[in-house]
Amino acid sequence: MTAPILVTGGTGTLGSLLVPRLREAGREVRVLTRHARPASDGTEYVACDLLQGDGLDEAVAGAETVVHLAGGPKGDEIATRNLAEAAKRAGARHLVYVSVTGVEGVPIAWLRSKLASEQAVADSGVPWTTLRPAQFHSLVLGIAQKMAKSPVVPAPGALRFQPVDERDVADRLAELALGAPAGLVPDLAGPTDYTLPELLRSYLAAAGKRRPMLPVPMAGKIGRAYREGLNLAREGAARGTRTWESYLADHVAARTPAKA
């Protein structure tokens, strides 16, 4: 019997795609959750508070590979450090972390927290792998939906994105989790680069909506970072295969009647 793979955030957007892939590979999976729940489909669930550390040693015990997907608006670096230290104490052989593109260049607090989490993983003493994917299609869709609620949609033309499908990220992450520790691997971006207006126009078309768009500048250090493309994947990044347009077709166009 092989040791289980522990996945934090295993019930979230990415985790719910990763766990079945690990199970299909014949691995036992233990999912760390905030609240206890019964085992299901061969997956064990253990309750733990990553920020407080309650129950963490018990959750990590026996897991040779730990995949850290869980995150929140605050305290990511604390939670990651707690998990990394517990993984070290438990003798884990592989700690896998999912970060995001742009952590080194865009001065946003959340990204700085992700970078600090990367450092906690690298300093843990556990052999590690870190993957930086671009923004998920689902995240970009949520942004577009919120912006489209306004009668006039602000559209900073300098913002560029490389949205990637969550399924492509789950495929890559399963490969990494089942493989040997590899350090900081090439970023994973979507197959196409877009400006924000291009993403918004395609969403509006798919949803059958008409909105005027107002070009607006993005000022300050954050705006400068986006204009310089510091949020984009590093040179040599891998590319996913599922496009933004196909994602819209699956999640918007098929369910939204066109409007005249």
Image (cartoon, helix red, strand yellow):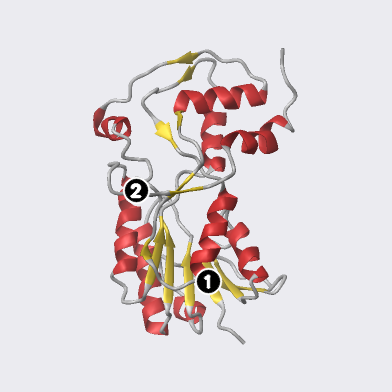
Q: Distance between the residues labelled 2 and 1?
A: 27 Å
Q: Mark 1 points at which residue?
A: 178
- Residue 105 is left or right of residue 243, and the answer is left
Work out whether residue 254 or residue 10 is closer to the camera in this orientation and state it. 254
Q: Residue furthest bottom?
A: 1
User: Percent x, y for residue 203?
Assistant: 59, 27
Q: Which of marks 2 and 1 is nearer the N terminus?
A: 2
User: Percent x, y for residue 137?
Assistant: 55, 41
Q: Quadrant of residue 108?
A: top left
Instruction: Nearest to the eye among marks 2 and 1: give it.
Output: 1
Q: Name the residue under label 2.
A: 111
- Residue 107 is left or right of residue 28, and the answer is left
Instruction: Identify which residue is drawn at 62% across, 77% down.
Output: 28
Quarter of the figure that contains the N terminus: bottom right
The residue carrying pointer 2 sits among few (fewer than 14), some (14 to 19) or many (20 or more) residues within 10 Å by Cα, namely: some
Of helix, strand and loop, which one carries label 2?
helix
From this view, report whether residue 133 is shown above or below residue 67. Answer: above
Instruction: Identify which residue is drawn at 50% across, 25% down.
Output: 198
Residue 34 visible in the current orientation? yes
Q: Which amino acid does label 1 sit on?
A: Leu
From this view, report whether residue 241 is shown above or below residue 71. Answer: above
Q: Which residue lies furthest to the front in this view?
A: 236
The residue carrying pointer 1 sits among few (fewer than 14), some (14 to 19) or many (20 or more) residues within 10 Å by Cα, namely: some
Residue 147 visible in the current orientation? no
Query: What is the tally of numbered marks visible in this picture?
Result: 2
User: Percent x, y for residue 229?
Assistant: 33, 35
Q: What residue type is labelled 2?
A: Leu
Work out whether residue 31 or residue 64 is closer to the camera in this orientation and state it. 64
